[in-house]
Image (cartoon, rainbow, N blue to C red):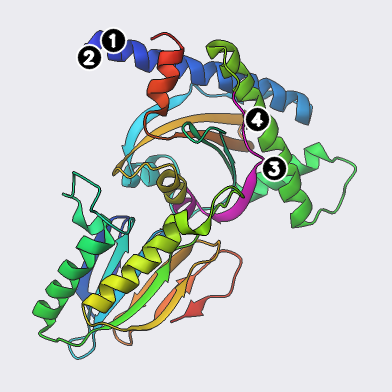
């Protein structure tokens, strides 16, 4: 039986085919789909913030890109016994932009940059991505094929 | 802080939202030419999951209008409405217009939201005796989950628990509904309560 496993904000889930991993409503947050192809095992992380450095309370580590990605990648590599993982990412939008804000300050963009840097540090290359822009996204990860469907409101579905 | 004092602060905050919301409902009613009712203001701390279970599901498509208070330290107003209700409201505002493009509906909704924000602010300004200015509204159509999380994050509210401050407006029974949120920056409520002398 295939089950759809939902990942909330600041959370992650790890599971195996035929299950699907889903996260709804990525605005400025970024969703990172990780996949161990031999085991058909994957993880989906929904990070909210790029960097935990300036926070005293780091207990909810899946919230931060810099803490979440090393831990989740480790867990998936260990559980699946595979070193080489595939990665696809989506999100990091700027849903509302006031003219007074520069893009450097925008959290969506900073989330994307942080995710790229963290993945690079973990020797992982992003296979495909659908990031930035002004629209929210939802991700549907098929763990049989590692097709990642990105759904948006009033737009064509995009398959990563 | 004593329990009594924090209760007093909670009551004061709820009263401010009540007065602001009441003012907004009156303006709204004048604008659409029919009565507008309002619930008791909703002031509560909830997790994201609780918000999506109790207030609105994260996968609901909504229209959302946002306006930022100038000065960078207060926060934003957010008006959320079902796209079908936005369509109905637009027809009330522009009754002679039979066929409306989405652009025209959005424009009417932005104007309506602007009136709500401005009249809410006007009431608060009279209470604190201080000028407050809201930016021109920006709007989008998207999932409630994407909108809510992005707005809270943008206001530097990074906690897993969200301070939800909300007025619900109704017209024609419950056929048309809209919700006004105020999303405060950290310390904004402290500032407001101090200005109220509490």
- Residue at point 50%, 78% (across, down): A158
Q: Chain of mark 3?
A: B
Q: CA distance from mark 1 to mark 2?
A: 7 Å
Q: Earlier in the sequence, mark 2 or mark 3?
A: 2
Which residue is label 4 attached to?
A: B116
Which residue is label 2 attached to?
A: B1
Callout 1: 10 Å neighbours few (<14), some, many (20+)? Answer: few
From the viewer's perspective, is A22 left or right of B130?
left
Residue A148, quarter of the rendered image: bottom left
User: Do the CB atoms of the residues marked 1 and 4 lie less than 8 Å apart?
Assistant: no
User: Do the CB atoms of the residues marked 1 and 2 lie less than 8 Å apart?
Assistant: yes
- Residue at point 55%, 11% (across, down): B127
Mark 2 secondary-structure assignment: loop
Residue nearest the observer in this picture, A127 or A118: A118
Q: Earlier in the sequence, mark 1 or mark 4?
A: 1
- Residue at point 23%, 84% (across, down): A85
Tell me the magenta residue range: B132-147
Which residue is label 1 attached to?
A: B5
Residue A71 vs B109, above or below: the answer is below
């Amino acid at each position: 039986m295939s089950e759809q496993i939902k990942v909330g904000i600041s959370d992650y889930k790890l599971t195996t085919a035929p299950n699907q991993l889903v996260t709804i409503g990525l605005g400025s947050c970024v969703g990172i789909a990780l996949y161990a192809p031999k085991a058909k095992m994957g993880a989906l992380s929904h990070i909210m913030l790029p960097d935990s450095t300036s926070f005293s309370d780091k207990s909810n580590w899946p919230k931060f890109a810099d803490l979440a990605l090393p831990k989740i990648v480790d867990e998936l590599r260990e559980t699946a016994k595979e070193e080489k993982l595939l990665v696809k990412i989506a999100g990091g939008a700027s849903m509302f932009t006031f003219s007074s804000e520069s893009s450097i300050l925008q959290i969506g963009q900073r989330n994307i940059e942080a995710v790229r840097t963290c993945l690079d540090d973990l020797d992982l290359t992003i296979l495909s991505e659908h990031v930035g822009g002004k629209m929210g996204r939802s991700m549907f990860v098929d763990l049989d094929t590692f097709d990642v469907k990105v759904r948006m409101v009033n737009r064509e579905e995009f398959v990563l | 802080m004593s329990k009594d004092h924090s209760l007093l602060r909670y009551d004061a905050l709820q009263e401010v939202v009540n007065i602001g919301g009441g003012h907004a409902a009156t303006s709204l009613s004048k604008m659409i030419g029919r009565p507008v009712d309002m619930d008791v203001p909703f002031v509560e701390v909830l997790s994201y999951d609780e918000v999506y279970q109790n207030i609105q599901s994260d996968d609901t498509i909504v229209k959302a209008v946002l306006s930022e208070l100038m000065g960078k330290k207060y926060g934003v107003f957010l008006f959320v409405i079902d796209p079908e209700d936005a369509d109905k409201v637009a027809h009330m505002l522009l009754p002679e217009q039979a066929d409306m493009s989405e652009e025209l509906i959005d424009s009417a909704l932005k104007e309506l939201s602007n009136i709500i924000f401005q009249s809410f602010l006007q009431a608060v300004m009279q209470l604190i005796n201080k000028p407050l200015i809201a930016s021109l509204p920006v709007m989008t159509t998207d999932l409630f989950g994407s909108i809510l999380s992005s707005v809270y994050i943008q206001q530097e509210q990074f906690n897993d628990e969200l301070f939800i401050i909300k007025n619900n407006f109704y017209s024609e029974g419950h056929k048309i509904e809209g919700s006004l949120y105020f999303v405060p920056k950290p310390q904004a409520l402290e500032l407001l309560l101090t200005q109220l002398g509490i």
